[in-house]
Amino acid sequence: MRRLGLDEWSGLVMLAVCVGVGSPVMFGLVEPDIPVPVWMGLFVVTLGAALGAVAEWGRPSRRWTAYGIAVAAGWGVVATAPRAGMLPILLVVIASLGPEAVRLPVNLLVVALNTAVITLTVSRVRDGLVEPLTAGVFYGLIQIATTFSVTAVLREQQHRRELTRAHVELRAASLLLAGSARTAERLRISRELHDLLGHQLTVLTLELEAARHRAGDPAREHVERAGRVAREVLADVRDTVSALRAEPAADLAAALRDVGRDIPGLDVTVEVGEDVEVNEEQTAALVRAVQEIITNALRHAYARELGVTIVRDGDAIRLTAADDGQGARDVVPGNGLRGLAERFAALGGEIAYDGGAGFRVTARMPAR
């Protein structure tokens, strides 16, 4: 079960505050200007629309619509219960939700209209202008303060997510560059071994072979032993060269864990089967896959936990990644996911997505 974070707890507290300021009318302590069932229905619509406006799964157009409904319904709730004491706090809460649903200029317009509604509502039950204006200024300043505070927090969170994504991409690029450097160095050493030692030992073998045919019987036995030794050394050099060329580019498990290490707000676990062996191209594909999966979990899924498993499945290597985020009914691959599909296809593999419960990625490629 997904644990509640600070955002969820703060949302629950705000919901409790809204219900609390509306409780005098709900419990019959204050009579609204309209029938109580109608007022309560309007109150429920206000809360439901406010929740829809900040829902992470909602599309922008739906969130704008929901926020507009919450604002209009909130005006009706406050205006029809002028004696409900602290009920205008409901409009303060609605204004504080604006940065998550609309642009700042629109949010400030809502603040101004909320302030006007509060001022007019208070003027209906208070004589003179002092108390209505005081209430309007008081609630208006609170709305402005909360709106700017929430806007600043959201921008800071966005910058942090962007920085985290850049950090993940930098780690992946560093690992791939390090792997390429190790591979280039192994190839350089193998070429030098082959060009220098291999050539010299081949010449030595030929010289000894010629000497065997020209020497007498006592010398021939020693020459033959030397020839066998030389051929063995040459075979050892060739085996070393082959091992250097075939050595995996990097420790796959360590590389993938390093990509997902210490990411704020996201706990990444990576499990790699002991029988999984990959070459440099496969390592690059898996590193890029984990990088893109982590980026999507941060950018779109708002997940807190991500598990990645890579195992040997018959003649294939299977990568499975699943997070606890919001998922998506209709997965529309962006440039990152399309790039992953092309990368795996180039290696003879395939990739599939499932957004039913969280977001799940399954990728396969032929084993070495």
Image (tube, helix red, strand yellow):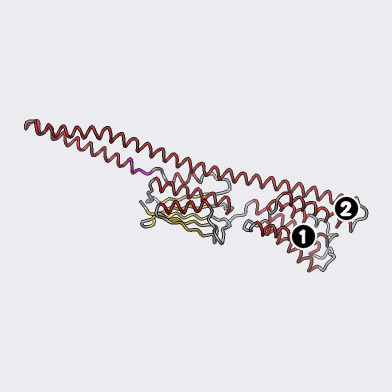
Q: Quadrant of the N terminus?
A: bottom right
> What amino acid is labelled 2 in the image?
Pro
Left or right of 230? Residue 306 is right
Q: Tell me, yes or no, whether the highlighted magenta stretch contains residue 247.
A: yes
User: What residue is at 43 percent from the left and 53 percent from the top?
Assistant: 344
Give the class, few, some or many, for how many residues have Cα within 10 Å of label 2's Cα (few <14, many ≥20): many
Q: Residue furthest right?
A: 128
Left or right of 48? Residue 308 is left
Give the class, few, some or many, for how many residues have Cα within 10 Å of label 1's Cα (few <14, many ≥20): some
First along the sequence among labels 2 and 1? 1
**In terms of secondary structure, where does tag 2 sit?**
helix
The x, y position of residue 154, in whole percent, is 66, 47
Overall secondary structure of the magenta stretch? helix
In space, the residues marked 2 and 1 are separated at their CA atoms by: 21 Å
Label ID, residue 226:
none
Residue 27 occupies quadrant: bottom right
Contact between labelled residues 1 and 2, with CB atoms less than 8 Å apart: no
Left or right of 11? Residue 337 is left
User: What residue is at 72 percent from the left and 49 percent from the top?
Assistant: 104
Q: Which residues are magenta?
A: 244-248
State whether residue 228 is above or below residue 59.
above
Q: Which residue is mark 1?
A: 72
Label ID, residue 132:
2
Residue 326 occupies quadrant: bottom right
Select label 2 or label 1 by which is in front: 1
Q: Residue furthest left?
A: 217
